[in-house]
Image (cartoon, rainbow, N blue to C red):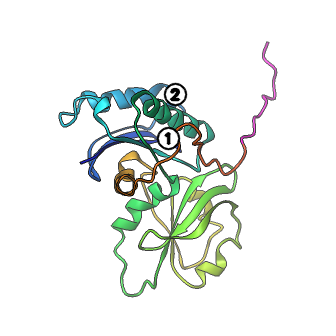
Amino acid sequence: MAYILCIETSTSVCSTALVKDGEVIAARQNNEGNSHATQLTLLIQDLFNDSAVIPDISDIDAVAVSSGPGSYTGLRIGVSTAKGICFAMDKPLIAVSSLAILAWPVVQQRVVDDSESDPWYCPMIDARRMEVYTAMFDQNMVQQRNTSADIIDQNSYQDILEQRKVFFFGNGAGKCKDSLGHSNAVFLDDEGPLARNMATMANDSWLRRRFEDVAYFEPFYLKDFIATTPKRKVL
């Protein structure tokens, strides 16, 4: 039996979940955006205050965190919080790809009919302007295209779309809809990457003992952080 605390902060949504043997027993989320620093620990506290199954956070067996790509600030907050809990209580750290978290519920809910020959699933996390963080997965959640930061135009993924249907989703997919005008490009609504959707993958990592080095683990940012300066100087 394993209790895993899951933390997801790769987008504007901040979410947590408590998982027992791959099943979600409690979950919390905040959709306000840009409030991860103030909301994450409160969500974790609320998770355990309202859970009758496990009395205290010290009773968890591991912490799972979204590893990126995604929001630079969000990922840093999530990972630093997860590492802090692991250090304080000597628990193992599990990392789960943000794009896999986003793809998991979509792949599980899709019923592929006979006319869809091996469709792929393309989660997209907004990286500003016409750029997205993305990858592609098949029906078995096997990654078929490497994680990348892509600038989308009318030529993007055309070779793949000529061969199969591709489902696009995530907070970066909407802005790509006009550019990806192929008949095999299908755009879906989704909830975004949420901690409760980490349950199966986090539990699988627990069973296989796939843990990260708590001291040295860093999020997969994919791109270097670029600080911007305000156009106006405020005294």
The residue tagged with tag 1: helix, strand or loop?
loop
Q: Residues within 10 Å of mark 2 (few under 14, many from 20)?
A: some
Q: Quadrant of the C terminus?
A: top right
Q: Residue at x 28, y 33 (%)?
A: 59
Residue 65, position in %: x, y?
Answer: 46, 44
**Front one among 150 and 145:** 145
Total numbered badges shown on the rendered structure: 2
**Front one among 198 and 150:** 198
Does label 2 or label 1 sit earlier along the sequence?
1
Q: Residue at x 35, y 48 (%)?
A: 196
Residue 204, position in %: x, y?
Answer: 36, 57
Q: Is residue 33 visible?
A: no
Q: Is residue 185 magenta?
A: no
Inspect the image, locate mark 1, and give the three-letter code of the amino acid beneath it: Thr
Residue 223, position in %: x, y?
Answer: 70, 49
The residue tagged with tag 2: helix, strand or loop?
helix
Start-end of magenta stretch: 225-235
Q: Residue 37 shows which numbered tag?
A: 2
Inspect the image, locate mark 2, and give the three-letter code of the amino acid beneath it: Ala
The CA distance from mark 2 to mark 1 is 10 Å
The residue indicated by pointer 1 is 9
**Front one among 85 and 42:** 85
Q: Residue furthest left?
A: 52
Residue 81, position in %: x, y?
Answer: 48, 32
Instruction: Give above or below for 133 relative to 122.
Output: above
* Main SS of residues in magenta: loop
Q: Residue at x 61, y 49 (%)?
A: 220
| Left or right: 165 as drawn, with respect to 41 | right
Q: Is residue 183 visible?
A: yes
Q: Is residue 232 magenta?
A: yes
| Left or right: 233 as drawn, with respect to 53 | right
